[in-house]
Image (tube, rainbow, N blue to C red):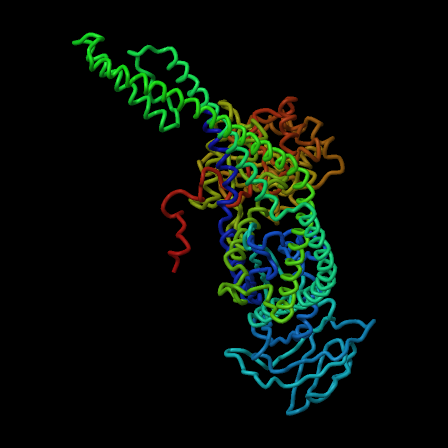
Amino acid sequence: MDNKNSKEINIKELINPYFKNWKYFVGFLFLMIIAAVYFIKSTTPVYKAQATVLIKDAKKMSPASGDIGVLQSLGGFSGMGTNSIENELGVFQSKTIIEDVLKEHNFQTPLYSKQTFYNLELYGKTSPYIIHIIQEKNDVELPKKPIYIKTNNNQITLISDEWDNEIVSSFNKTINLPFALMMISKNPNFKIPKKTKMSDVFFTYSDFDSTVSNFQAQLEVDLLEKEGTIISLSVDFENKDKAKDFLNSLITQYNIYATNDKNIESKRTKDFIDKRISIISKELGDVETQKEGYKSSNNIVDLPTEARINLQLKEQSKAQILEIGTQLELNKILENTLNKKETGDVLPFNLGLQNEAATKSIQEYNTLVSQRNKLLREATPDNPVVKSINSQIDELRGSLKETLQKNETSLALAKRKVEMQYGGSEEVIGKIPSQEKLFRSIERQQQIKENLYLLLLQKREEAAINVEITADKARTIDKAFVFKVPVAPKKVLILGVFMVFGILLPFSIIYLKEILQSTVNKRSDISKLTQNPIIAEIPKLKRSENNLVSFNDVSPIAEAFRILVTNLKFLLPIKDEPQIIMITSSVKGEGKTFVSTNLSIVLASARSKVLVVGADIRNPQLQRYNPSMKSAKGLTEFLGGEEFSSLNDIIHPSGFNENCDFIYSGSIPPNPTDLLQNNKLDDLLSMLKEQNKYKYIVLDTAPLLLVTDSFIIADKSDVIVYVTRSEVTEKSYLEFLNNSVEEKKLKNVGIVLNGVKESNFGYGNKFGYGYQAEKSKWWKKK
């Protein structure tokens, strides 16, 4: 729980300085917003102009061009392929093309008109003058300041802060300026722009090379898509018309370059092709003559056709030989079967024999055998019908044998004929590879020459056409256009940046002040550095407030001292004799006497007798509240041994409260330390105790860090009130206090923080309790 509270307190302490100074944040933020608005108003708007072009290649070949693509790899025909798009980007950004564009326009001497917040560039129809640069002067200093133009009818007066004298001339006449020869003429198309001041018109000048470099730096060229050939051109200019003219002229100039390049390339290509056609034509004639002689000597009309025919013939012969062989085998099978069969046996039928006579005879034979066998089931072999059928079977059998023998003879003759045909085809086919090799070599040369000849003829026609008809290489997709919203100044961004600065600036100041702050400012600063209790916070006096607390005072200071008295009583021991309160601090100026006096007045207000002793005899301050007592005898005289009839001789009424008396410091002695160590102070305190007149004795002592006087008195006190002052007491002084307490040089110490600002007052106290002490808010004040 303690850790949680500690964290909460730490966070509050971290952010508290910023919340307390919220007025600074509001003020700085307001000032930064005003500054941002002024900055935006005083900045000339810059607009982005853009144009897009498609880079096309008029000489790019289609896939139907066949072998024409081979030439694309040849150096002399590099234009026939697609140009590198990266190279085209470089062309647009080249200094040469920008130089040619600037030569067409008057961009060296931009004309401006001074407006309320910024200078407005005049161009085109809005420019009253046209300035022509006739000749630049070399090795001269260029003008750094604007040159104002004043006109009176036809007279021109040029004025510059860099010149001792004005230059007077006329329109349309050469003007000799220190840096160039120029001519100024009236713009016939001039139209006064609306809401534009034309009283102060001036121009600036830069040499041609610098202007080119400037435009080159402002031009942005990039691909619209990585895989495409569409190029985006853009510039950021103050004048919209100037930006559009520049981009459109850049595209036009690019096309002029490309057209010239194409015409030169086409002419050179045509000349080269004409020479090659003459050579290829002669070579083609030689190859065709060689082909004709080879065909005549080898009796060849068409080698592939003849080879195909012979292959077909060979295959047919081979198939016929196989077929005839099969028929011979089938014929032999039937002859053998016929010889082995008896009269009652049928012959095999439908074996595939391709002889109709034999097949018909076999069929008839089998029919007769079937009839005979059917009759024998019911009759005997001697039956006349059976005998008749047997006779027919024998006749048919002899006829079938004769038919099969003739068929065998005819098949053998056919086989020999086909075999001879097969052998001839094989001989012809065997010669074809060597003939084809030689013929293909000749024919290949002919085809190469023919294709090349046709290619060159086609390229010559293309080159001739390209010379006569040349299309723009860059096709404009979007002419130069200007975006409506200016790219600069970026209002939201600028406003945001200024607002961030408006917050960061007071934040940084407060932060640096906090980390560089070496003095204590508020209660928490002391509580972090020491374990000694803080018994009161005294608010800082305002100029109109009284230094001393009055009777029935309800001011914040009075309440603070009442709190001091209350907390002090917790530190005082309970005893019957007077209680001694020692008031001290680290250095002078921390308010010891102020605290001593007011503490005594508040203690006396409770009808308790209080005596204040001015124990700081080195630098007496107590008598400043009663200047008439500056020469009064006091503590110094008593310590010095001067005889008094009674203590009442050095005790004087305070004049502020009847229950409060003072013993002033007296004159400043040369040896204050010796006086404080001579035991006379002990005698004084003993005498006061014996009187038992005063309940409290308040010792206003010297600062501890400067002298040892207060350490001598410290052991005589019941409680020590250690006064610190906001924004005065160094934090390192509290380390001195801690060491003094640890070394037991000081005891029973209570710390008072004096001079606390209202914003630093602890516990959120806004000074004062009770209704009459409440402060009205500023917005409720009348």
* Any part of residue 362 in sight: yes
Farthest residue, direction left:
378
Above or below residue 513? Residue 479 is below
Q: Position of residue 355 (x, y in %)?
A: 39, 27
Q: Nearer the viewer, residue 383 or 739?
A: 383
Using residue 411 as the reference point, say whether residue 258 is left or right of it: right
Above or below residue 167? Residue 369 is above
Q: Position of residue 443 (x, y in %)?
A: 66, 48
Farthest residue, direction bottom:
153
Q: Position of residue 286 (x, y in %)?
A: 73, 55
Asked where in the image residue 642 lies, by quadrant, the reply is: top right
Q: Nearer the viewer, residue 98 or 702?
A: 98
* Any part of residue 600 in sight: no
- The residue at 32%/19% (across/down) is 395
Using residue 547 as the reference point, say whether residue 778 is left or right of it: left
Q: Nearer the viewer, residue 141 or 354?
A: 354
- Work out which quarter of the rendered image holds the C terminus and state it: bottom left
- Work out which quarter of the rendered image holds the N terminus and state it: top left
Using residue 683 as the reference point, say whether residue 271 is left or right of it: right
- Say how many tags the image has: 0
Q: Position of residue 622 (x, y in %)?
A: 61, 42
Farthest residue, direction right:
139
Above or below residue 242? Residue 716 is above
Q: Nearer the viewer, residue 557 or 391?
A: 391
Asked where in the image residue 662 lies, by quadrant, the reply is: top right
